[in-house]
Amino acid sequence: MINLNINVNNKDFEISIEEDKRLIDLLRDDLKLTGVKEGCSEGECGACSVILDGKLVNSCLIMAFQINNSKILTIEGLGQGDDLNYIQKAFIEVGAVQCGYCTPGMILAAKAILDANQNPSRDEIREGISGNLCRCTGYEKIVDAVELAGRYLNGSEIYR
Amino acid sequence: MIKRGKGIAISYYGTGYGNGYPDVSNTKIKLNKEGKVEIFVGGTEVGQGAKTVFLQIAAETLNTSIDDIILFSEDTSIMPDAGTAAASRQTYNTGNAIKKACEELSIKLKLIAKEILNLNTTEGLIVSNSSIYLSFYEEKKVSFLDIAKYLGENLLIIESNFIAQTVEMDLETGQGAPYWPYTFSACEVEVEVNTLTGVVNILSAKFAQDTGKAVNPNMIEGQMDGGFCMGLGFSLFEDLNIINGRIKNDKLSKYLIPTSMDTVDIEKIIIEDPEFTGPYGAKGIGEPVTIPVAPAILNAIYDAINVRITDLPATPDKIVMAIKKDSKAEDKNGKID
């Protein structure tokens, strides 16, 4: 067992874990953050994306022991219930969700894009979400939603 | 060398089970004690928007907001069977069942309203925003909640179904009309083919979809985007690689589906031509939005390199081989490109 000090969604945790535990299992099984989805388990699909110290990562490819003293953001940390983040609102407004399995990872990928650039071009958005697979939407409305979220962020469009 | 080509394809597709097979959607509607309408239906939401469309159709029929309707679906222990979320049939079949049930509910509610309001007949009664009133004398009004209180424990429950009209084909002649309704689609694609590497890039795409009445245009656009993307994967990337009955490409690192970098923004055209047997004219579009995509892409590849690819997916290796084979054939004939 290894002791970890981590900050998840702005809450500090001191947690004891097995050496062979993956980050995704720590988040889903121990912290019950089931918005982190397991898709391919091999870093192809991005459904398990989380933001680790400001960078978008696949939590299925990271061992839990690697993240001591790190800060992690999952979809639950952005917004829940009626209290939604501007990116989540943009996804709903545009209709960028179909089955929803890729959505938590997509929204975190969108956050990573917008944290770096408030006015991304459509090509930059397409590149930024290219590590997140979506089987339903054909991506176009997701690109629209990230553009809209960018407009919310830079204030050129107001959201309710 | 980079070569460009354009291709189009059109398709028509019969929705529902067809060919005389029983195609039934059942639904149950209840006026609960709070005066809200509860719909129980087994139609499954898989992201295509079934629940949204069911609520829209019910709200339209009952002339009220979707907020006044509670939809329960998918729990098979309490749901009447509405058939599979397949064959592009939920909007048409289950939508029709819900419309029919809501119409029957309206009739029953008007009869009860007539009793409560002490009227001669139900003529002139309007159902609107969870209440019923007399069109020319609005003081004669009763809310769904009043009706629920009046009924007490004796809850109003309507069970209804829609059976699609399908005709079995003549086994001897193969003639007949196995499906109804049909849905029409058209797709146009422009591609760029690298003749050295065999890589195909989609440059632009247009998709026109006949919808009957478009119940939810935004979600129809989403289906068109998704259908195009699946058709694109089917024609260029996706290969199960089945060897001796075993799927070799059994993970996403081997079975490749399109990423956001492989697709383009699609010019989408919704064509509304209401189908008289559909709920408010609506037809199913779930599968039709995929069908013409692969032939349009393959036609575009043919237009670009003048070689017909007949084995899917049209991967770079197959395209390079086909070009080489074709140029050898041309050499023998003494032709020069």
Image: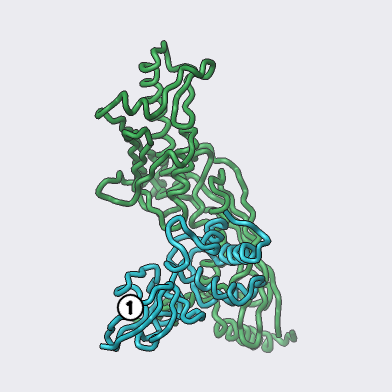
Chain colours: A cyan, B green
- Whole-percent x and y of residue B6? 69, 69
Q: A33 above or below B105?
A: below
The image quadrant that residue B297 belongs to is: bottom right
Q: Would you say B133 lies left or right of A31 here? A: right
Query: Hey, what amino acid is under mark 1?
Result: Leu
Please give the name of the residue rendered at 36% of the width and 38% of the height, measured from the top-left corner.
Answer: B161
> Can the viewer see residue B8?
no
Along the line of sight, the residue nearer the viewer: B291 or B334: B291
Left or right of B49 in this view: B7: right
Q: Residue at x 68, y 85 (%)?
A: B330
Residue placed most toward the observer, B293 or B91? B91
Q: Quadrant of the N terminus of chain A?
A: bottom left
B323 versus A133 height, above or below? below
Secondary element type, mark 1:
helix
Which residue is drawn at the image coordinates 65% and 79% (left, top)? Answer: B193
Give the residue at mark 1: A26
Q: Is residue B162 above or below residue B44?
A: above
Q: Quadrant of residue B243?
A: bottom left
| Host chain of mark 1 | A
The image shows residue B285 at horizontal and vertical percentages of: 51, 52
Question: What x and y, as percent, mark residue B58?
Answer: 45, 38
| Residue A41 in view in this figure | yes
